[in-house]
Image (spheres, rainbow, N blue to C red):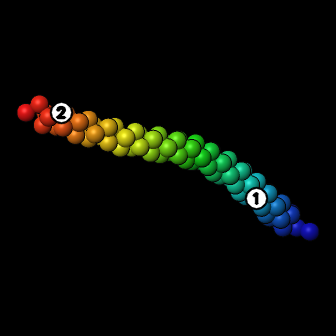
Amino acid sequence: MQPEIIVGVLSLFGTLIGSIGGIMTANKLTGYRIEQVEKKLDSYSQNQNELMHRVIKLEDTNTLLLEKISVANHRIDDLEKGKA
């Protein structure tokens, strides 16, 4: 076999191995990055759920306090009408 053909075939195999190795390494890195983004997203989602529960609790407390204020205002009005 001619030396040029042998060099060409060896170059082909070297190029293929290098390309496949590069693709596999890039694929691993991409997979790792996707994992990290998913972890951040899960953390964000949990924080958002906790925040939503806190907001709902605050809204319930606000409604209760507004009702108490309304009742107190009615009592004050009744007392003022009774003294007049």
**41 or 17: nearer the viewer:** 41
Q: Quadrant of residue 76?
A: top left
Q: Is residue 52 left or right of residue 11?
A: left
Q: Residue at x 14, y 34 (%)?
A: 82
Q: Residue at x 41, y 43 (%)?
A: 60
Disc 2/disc 1 C-alpha distance (Å): 88 Å
Q: Look at the image and tell me in which quarter the N terminus lies.
A: bottom right
Residue 15, placed above or below residue 46: below
| Res. 73 in view | no
- Residue 20 image label: 1
Identify the residue at the far right of this view.
1
Image spot of residue 70 (x, y percent): 26, 41
Q: Position of residue 23 (x, y in %)?
A: 71, 57
Residue at (22% x, 40% y) in the render: 74
Q: Quadrant of residue 36?
A: top right
What amino acid is labelled 1 in the image?
Answer: Ile
Q: How many marks?
A: 2
- Mark 1 nearby-residue class (10 Å; few <14, some 14–19, many ≥20): few
Q: Amino acid at mark 2?
A: Leu
What residue occupies the far top of the structure in this picture?
83
- How many other residues sit within 10 Å of disc 2, few (<14), some (14-19) or many (≥20)? few
Quadrant (top left/top right/bottom left/bottom right) for the C terminus: top left
Q: Is residue 51 above or below residue 16?
A: above
Q: Which residue is mark 2?
A: 79
Residue 47 visible:
yes
Q: In the image, residue 41 lies at what x, y percent?
A: 56, 48
Q: Earlier in the sequence, mark 2 or mark 1?
A: 1
- Looking at the image, residue 32 sits to the left or right of residue 20; the answer is left
Q: What kind of element bears circle 1? A: helix
Q: Are marks 2 and 1 in contact (CB under 8 Å)?
A: no
- Identify whether 79 is placed above or below 1: above
Would residue 70 be found to the left or right of residue 54 on screen? left
